[in-house]
Amino acid sequence: MNQDKNKTTHFGYRDVPVKEKAGLVREVFDSVAGSYDLMNDLMSLGVHRAWKQDFAFRSGVMAGDSVLDLAGGTGDIAALMSKRVGTNGRVLLTDINESMLDVGRRRLEDRGIVSNVEFALVNAESLPFKDGEFDAVTIAFGLRNVTDKDAALREMYRVLKPRGRAMILEFSAVEAEPLKKIYDTWSFGVLPVLGKFIANDEASYRYLAESIRKHPPQEELAEMMRQAGFGEVGFRNLTGGIVAIHNGTRS
C-alpha cells in the first residue's frame, strides 16, 4: 500500500506522484485550450495538418463506421473522421479535459459538423463503453499525456470490434540525424519563448516539449501495443520520425 502511495511518474522532466499527474496535465490544457491550434502550428511549423490528413487516410475508416476519438481536443481528427463515416456513421469525440472538449464542440458546430459527431468527457484509462463497440479508435497527440499508457492501450483494445483498428498519431523519436539538433533547438530554445510571448505561458509549452522526449519511442510503443493484445502492429514515421503513426488490430 505504501509503495503504491509513493509511486511516481514523469510530468515532463519532473517526477511527480502518480495520483497528481492527471491534475497537472489538466492544468496545462486548461491554460492552452484557447490557443491549442496555434500551439500545434508552433510545435510543428504547421505540418500537423498534413500529418492528420495522412493519419485519417491510413485509418481505413469507412462509411457507416463507429469511431471513438480519444483526447480529441479541438476536433481536428473528429472532423476528418466525420467525413469518412458519412451520414450513417458515428464519431464520438472525447477528452478528459472539459475546456478542450468545449473548444472542440464549438469549433465543429461553427463548421456545421453536427449530425454524426457526439461528445463525451472520458478518461482514456477507464472507458465507459461496452466491449466491442467501435470499428476504430483514434488518438492523436494525446497518448503521451496519459498517466497509465498500458491501461489506455488495453481499454482501446477492449472497446474495439473484432478486426477493429486502433490508430495512434504522436510525436516520436527523431531518426533523421540532420533533424535532431534543429528539432531540439526549436523545442527547447524557441518554442517556450514563443509560448511566453504569444500565449503568456512559457511553462506549459516547456512541459509539452519535455513530454515528447519522455514518450516511448517507436519500437517501444509498438511492443506496448502487442502486450495490450493488438495484432498486426506497425508504425510509419513521418517527417524523419518527428511523428509516427502506429496501428494495431483486435483479433
Image (cartoon, rainbow, N blue to C red):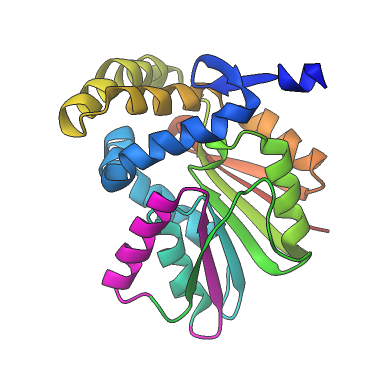
Give the camera-side residue of 34 and 61: 34
Query: Is residue 212 found left or right of 194 in the rendered image?
Result: right
Indicate whether residue 159 is drawn in magenta: no
Q: Position of residue 68 (x, y in %)?
A: 59, 62
Query: Is residue 208 found left or right of 94 in the rendered image?
Result: left
Give the camera-side residue of 14 and 62: 14
Identity of the residue drawn at 63% across and 29% down: 19
Q: Position of residue 125 (x, y in %)?
A: 67, 45
Identity of the residue drawn at 57% across and 40% down: 143
Q: Position of residue 229 (x, y in %)?
A: 82, 47
Q: Residue furthest left?
A: 197
Q: How many marks?
A: 0
Indicate whether residue 112 is drawn in magenta: yes
Asked whether residue 37 appears in the rendered view, the answer is no
Query: Is residue 18 found left or right of 82 in the rendered image?
Result: right
Q: Position of residue 246 (x, y in %)?
A: 61, 44
> In the rendered image, which quarter contains the N terminus?
top right
> In the rendered image, which quarter contains the C terminus?
bottom right
| Residue 90 sits above or below residue 92 on the image | below
Q: Residue furthest bottom?
A: 88
| Residue 221 sits above or below residue 9 on the image | below
Identity of the residue drawn at 49% across and 54% down: 55
Residue range (magenta): 87-113
Asked whether residue 221 appears in the rendered view, the answer is yes
| Residue 61 sits above or below residue 103 on the image | below
Query: Is residue 122 found left or right of 205 in the rendered image?
Result: right
